[in-house]
Amino acid sequence: MPNENVKFFNPAAGPLQEETVIVTSVDGLAVGDVDIPAQDRTISAYFARPAGQPDPPLLLLLCEAFGVHEHIRDVVRRFAKEGYFAVAPDLMVRQGNPESFNDISVLVQDLLLKIPDDQVMTDLDSTVQWAEEQGANILQASVTGFCWGGRWTWLYASHRKLNAAVAWYGILDGRRSDIFRGVLDRYPKHPIDLIGSLQTPVLGLYGGSDDAISLATIKDMQAALQEGSEAAKRSEIQIYLEAGHAFVADYRSSYRKTAALDGWNRCLAWLRELRSL
């Protein structure tokens, strides 16, 4: 059943900036919380699709560090308003509940860094299969993700051939990030290591003032893509020099409206362009 009354923003994200929060209605949409059969259990997900529209293209939406909370649910509805069957699976459920954390550093250490990348890839494959059974067009499937989900977006674009991918400020090289210090043995491959096997062209949207991802790392990724697979060579990275991390998170103080709107428009244009090829 639809659950449009849920308005939970994860407290680990910091104080809620209510004045800039975008609210997307469910009018014209079919929305709901669902359970998706995965390899070893069911995983919950939130979906939205245009009501009465047959065969809408699938868009996988990979959540930021804070889980499938209200901001992610709203973004799912935004994509549905653009004609997509959008679904955000809970990729963290086996390791914990991000809603139970009040501190982002603890959330990262005690939950996110315990999630194996292979598990995420398998759960996304299961989500694609479920969506096909619900009438989504998986031949026109795409993936997008924010923050932690932005990193997973690059990985899934290497794991599976889709129409398009859009990664918003996802970590590119764990070896150059303090976040992965001490756990690199658990994460031997990062996006910058997979450019040779990239199967799906990726649009990367990054802030040039991101404390978590240096501008040098972003530029190294831009250069590396030109030496990668055919899909890598078709990939692009847009840098917003004045924006930091999470610049599209309209409920946080990190929100930068100009960069967020430009990124949104570039994202939609990228998805449309590659769907038409």
Image: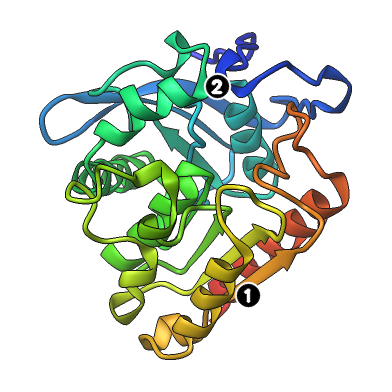
> Which residue is the site of mark 1?
273
Rendering coords of residue 143 (x, y %): 47, 55
Sort mark 1 into few (<14), some (14-19) or many (20+) by Cα contacts within 10 Å. few
Q: Dividing the picture into quarters, in which one does residue 51 lie? A: top right
Judge whether residue 60 can be spotted in this image.
no
Q: Is residue 157 left or right of residue 18?
A: left
- Farthest-out residue, left: 40
Look at 73% across and 28% down and name the residue there.
Answer: 252
Q: Is residue 152 left or right of residue 186?
A: right
- Viewer-closest of 149 and 200: 149
Judge whether residue 231 can be spotted in this image.
yes
Look at 80% across and 26% down and name the residue there.
Answer: 21
Task: Tell me which amino acid carries mark 1.
Answer: Glu
Q: Dividing the picture into quarters, in which one does residue 35 lie? A: top left
Instruction: State which tag comes first along the sequence, 2 or 1.
Output: 2
Look at 19% across and 46% down and name the residue there.
Answer: 186
- Viewer-closest of 71 and 237: 237
> Which residue is the site of mark 2?
69
Task: Tell me which amino acid carries mark 2.
Answer: His
